[in-house]
Image (spheres, rainbow, N blue to C red):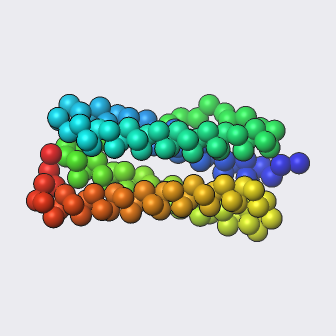
């Protein structure tokens, strides 16, 4: 029998990933309106990565004999500049890191190693994403272009 808490973590993770994809897609369109095509492409790439995570999580949930429930996505967070968007995304990714760390530790304690490995894999991707956001923010600050 599957652990209901693990199913809960998977469900929360799926909701996060779909919310993140929605946010990145909306931000992609917003920065495209600002004439920032390279940044628009970056946000689209981020959305694609988040959808890949959602796919992995859904597969794992199905493995447990459960299906993802309809969940309410978090509202899209936008801003008035690229720096604002990056700060919003950093906060969102930090929330994901906390979720994946908690889920991974729980799964390790329960000896649900396949689940722990999945959460660890996505956790590492999210940590890398925060580093990328930090680098982009540093680049903006270094060039004096923190506002869009």
In this view of the protein, which residue sits in the foreground, 101 or 31?
31
Q: Is residue 118 visible?
A: yes
The residue located at (17%, 35%) in the rendering is 34
- Location of residue 33 with respect to 88 vertically, above or below: above
Is 26 displayed left or right of 84 in the figure?
Answer: right
- Which of the image's four quarters has the C terminus? top left
Q: Is residue 77 visible?
A: no
Where residue 123 sits in the image (x, y, percent)? 55, 59
The residue located at (10%, 59%) in the rendering is 144
Where residue 86 sits in the image (x, y, percent)? 30, 52
The residue located at (70%, 60%) in the rendering is 116
Is 134 displayed left or right of 103 in the figure?
Answer: left
Is 84 displayed left or right of 56 in the figure?
Answer: left
In this view of the protein, which residue sits in the foreground, 99 or 41?
41
Residue projecting furthest to the left: 144
Is 4 displayed left or right of 131 in the figure?
Answer: right
Choose top left, top right, bottom left or bottom right for residue 44: top left
């Amino acid at each position: 029998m599957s652990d209901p808490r693990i199913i809960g973590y998977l469900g929360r993770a799926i909701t996060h990933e779909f919310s993140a994809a929605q946010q990145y897609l909306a931000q992609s369109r917003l920065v495209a309106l600002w004439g920032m095509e390279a940044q628009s492409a970056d946000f689209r790439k981020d959305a694609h990565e988040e959808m890949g995570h959602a796919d992995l999580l859904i597969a794992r949930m199905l493995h447990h004999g459960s299906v993802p429930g309809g969940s309410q996505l978090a509202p899209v967070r936008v801003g008035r500049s690229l720096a604002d968007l990056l700060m919003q995304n950093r906060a969102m990714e930090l929330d994901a890191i906390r979720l994946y760390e908690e889920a991974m530790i729980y799964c390790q304690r329960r000896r649900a190693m396949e689940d722990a490995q999945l959460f660890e894999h996505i956790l590492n991707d999210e940590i890398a994403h925060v580093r990328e956001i930090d680098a982009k923010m540093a680049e903006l600050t270094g060039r004096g272009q923190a506002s869009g």
